[in-house]
Image (cartoon, rainbow, N blue to C red):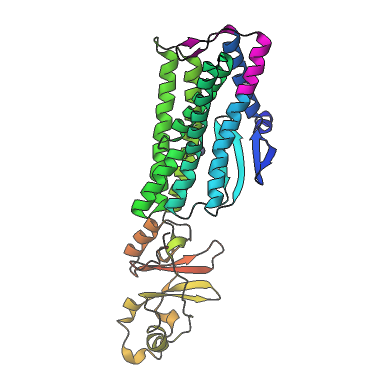
Amino acid sequence: MKLAEIFKRQITVAHIFGIPVRFDYRWFIVFVLSVWLIAMNLSRGGMWVGSFKLMPVSVTVAWLLAVVTTVGLFLSVLGHELSHALMGRAEGIEIEEIVLHPFGGLARLRNEPDSPRAEFRIAIAGPAASFVFAAVSFGLMLAAMMTNYPVIGGIMFLLGAGNLLLAIFNLFPGYPLDGGRVLRAILWRRTGDIKEATRLAGVCGMLIAAILIIFGVYMAVAPTFRAYFMGFWSVLVGVFLFDAAYSVVKQVRGRLRNIVSEAMTAPFAIEPDTLISHLIDSILPMHRQVAFPVAQNHRLHGMLSLEDLKSLPRERWHLTRAREVMRPIAPRFFVEPNATLDYAQELMKRNGIGSVAVVGKTGELVGFLQSGKFKRKKRK
Ligand SMILES: [Zn+2]
């Protein structure tokens, strides 16, 4: 476990436009792997650029070029994230940091975009930058090939392909990929409901992740491909994406969950000694409730249902006190703030008074819930 923590510890490598850029130690593994793969390909001359096969270069040159190419790919990912970050800033959102993880990067915004339009712009900025980098790289590749610098052409081909892949992959419509954010912005704009839009986009993210994993396994085991490395990579990215999408969906589900504390109103309680005449004449006109919690010093003593007062003759109203006609406290008359609304509704249907008191962990009265009369949380 200790080793895993060391690998996940983040180090700040730079500040760009005042934005801290960090990565963790796992990133170095990917760096070394990338350098090694490119160096192997260059020194064996096994790399194809279009229909042109590159001549092998010496081992030293191969390693040098591999480092240059990998740094170029690293800068491409950084440029992609920086593009998100700067668009976020243009939309008035401060940027917490840019984190580069083994499979790409993440520009962490301090808060969520407040409109679908802002969300869309911030999301699309990254892939747009990658497309531009890809176009520039391919342009330079052509120039290098025509002026007979095939190795430079090869590097530019790798950078162009890398950026193109980065742009296309990120446009897959699954949250938290950029395409998923675009999808969320569209759904959000259509329905006006950001939570539901996030949940749907997150589910799409999980689906895409599952497809990547299945595709990766197929690539590795199918006799026609036997592309172990690509298959392994696809599975790894799939697992990583699934985890991220799942946690987003889970988080939204938690927020969508209807709990009592989200719907309850502030408790209006009467004292055990309150006269019924006072309740009817002075309190009821101000507080239209079907029942009243009876409490003293925030301690619930019982519930007084108006229904129960019907059997009380009018001439006795000024002689009767709340505690004499209330229903004494019982489990069916109160819920805890974190109880589900479904549970509370079930209770209100059955307890005969159409309402429940909400009582906190330490026993104090904190809220009131009446069936059919919830204070619905305003949706943004
Ligand atoms: Zn992006």
In the image, 137 versus 98, the foreground residue is 137
Establish if 141 lies above or below 358.
above
321 above or below 372?
below
Residue 66 inside the magenta-drawn segment: yes
Q: Where is residue 180 in the image (x, y as percent from the top left)?
A: 42, 40
> Magenta segment range?
44-69
Above-or-below relation of 46 to 29? above
Residue 220 placed where, x, y %? 45, 15
Percent x, y of residue 335: 45, 62
- Kindly identify the residue that appears in the image at 65 percent across and 38 percent down: 22
- Residue 95 at least partly seen: yes
Q: Residue at x 66, y 47 (%)?
A: 18
On-image quarter of the C terminus: bottom left
Q: Which residue is drawn at 46% across and 79% down?
A: 270
Q: In this view, does 226 lie to the left or right of 59?
A: left
The image quadrant that residue 193 belongs to is bottom left
> Seen from this angle, which residue lies furthest front?
147
From the viewer's perspective, tell me whether residue 3 is left or right of residue 112. Answer: right
Indicate whether residue 53 is drawn in magenta.
yes
Depth order, front residue of 325/98: 98
Name the spot of residue 16 as percent of width and height, x first: 65, 42
User: Residue at 34% across / 53% down in the picture?
Assistant: 191
